Structures are given as C-alpha cells and as structure tokens.
Amino acid sequence: MCDRWAEQFEDRYANTDPQLRLDPGMAKAGIDLFRSLPGTSGRTVLLCTDLHPENVLAARREPWLAIDPKPYVEDPTHDPLQYMLNHPARLRADPVVFAQRVADLLDLDAQRLRLWLFARCVQSVRESHLQLVAKHLAP
C-alpha cells in the first residue's frame, strides 16, 4: 500500500506546477520515509487503515466499534494516522503534542509516530494544512 501511494505522490508531484510544489528535499525525505518505515517495524499487526471519526461507533458489546476496515498487515504505528489527519485543528495547533498524546494512549513509540505522520503528511500534501504539519514534523 505504501509503495503504491508513494508512486501516486511522485506522479502527482511531477505534474504539479513547480511554484506550487512542496520543497523537493522535504518531498524526498517524506516519501523515502513512507517507503522505508514499513520494513523497519519490530512487529506487524492487522490494521484497520481507515480509522476516522465516521468509522468509529458507540456500541453495546464494547464501548466503541470500528467499522469499514481496509485491512493490511503492517506496523501498528501506521494505524492512528488517518484518525490524526481527520483532526486538522489539533495537528495545526501542536502536531508534536498531538502525536505524543496519541502514542501514549496507544502505547506506541512517539518518535516513530511523528516520522510516520511526517511521511503521511508529505504523501497527502495536496491539502494545505498538511504542508504546515509536515514542516513542523520534518526529521
């Protein structure tokens, strides 16, 4: 999935007006991370990959129920990204604190989550608020 998304980014980037492109060094750093992070995880789990507010419901059998999964086996640190990207105000306010809070709640490595978040922000840079976040999270 990450390789396919990275290729789509590179095609989109190549066809974008140079005046509107993300800084080339930042783009390369983010996409290189996006490709390399999956292979460096110490463990893999079954991911939902589409965890956003509309896909989390209150339930009777459990307090919360995630629906509409797009399952992949991957680094567990990848899964909270979609949730985080669906909270642009929190990302703009303080992406480092937001990443730390999510990492703490999910018992994930906060530095690794920040790297994933930077890579994902670069990969989906067509949204202007993500450019700001990428600049704050760049390694």
Image: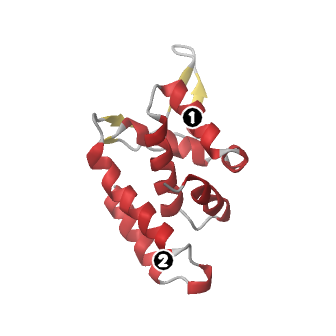
Q: Is residue 17 among what the camera can see? A: no
The three-letter amino acid code for the residue at tag 2 is Tyr
Write down the residue under mark 1. 100
Circle 1 sits in a helix, a strand or a loop, which is it? helix
**Observer-nearest of 1 and 94:** 94
Provide residue 27's location: percent of width, then percent of height: 47, 69
Identify the mark at residue 13; answer none if there is no mark: 2
Q: Is residue 16 above or below residue 86?
A: below
Q: Position of residue 20 (x, y in %)?
A: 61, 80
Q: Tell whether 123 sits left or right of 94.
A: left
* Three-letter amino acid code at the position of disc 1: Gln
* Residue name at image x 38 percent, y 36 percent: 76
Report the quarter where the N terminus lies: bottom left
Q: Position of residue 24 (x, y in %)?
A: 49, 75
- CA neighbours of label 1 inside 10 A, class few (<14), some (14 to 19), many (20+): some
Q: Position of 92 compared to 109: left or right?
A: right
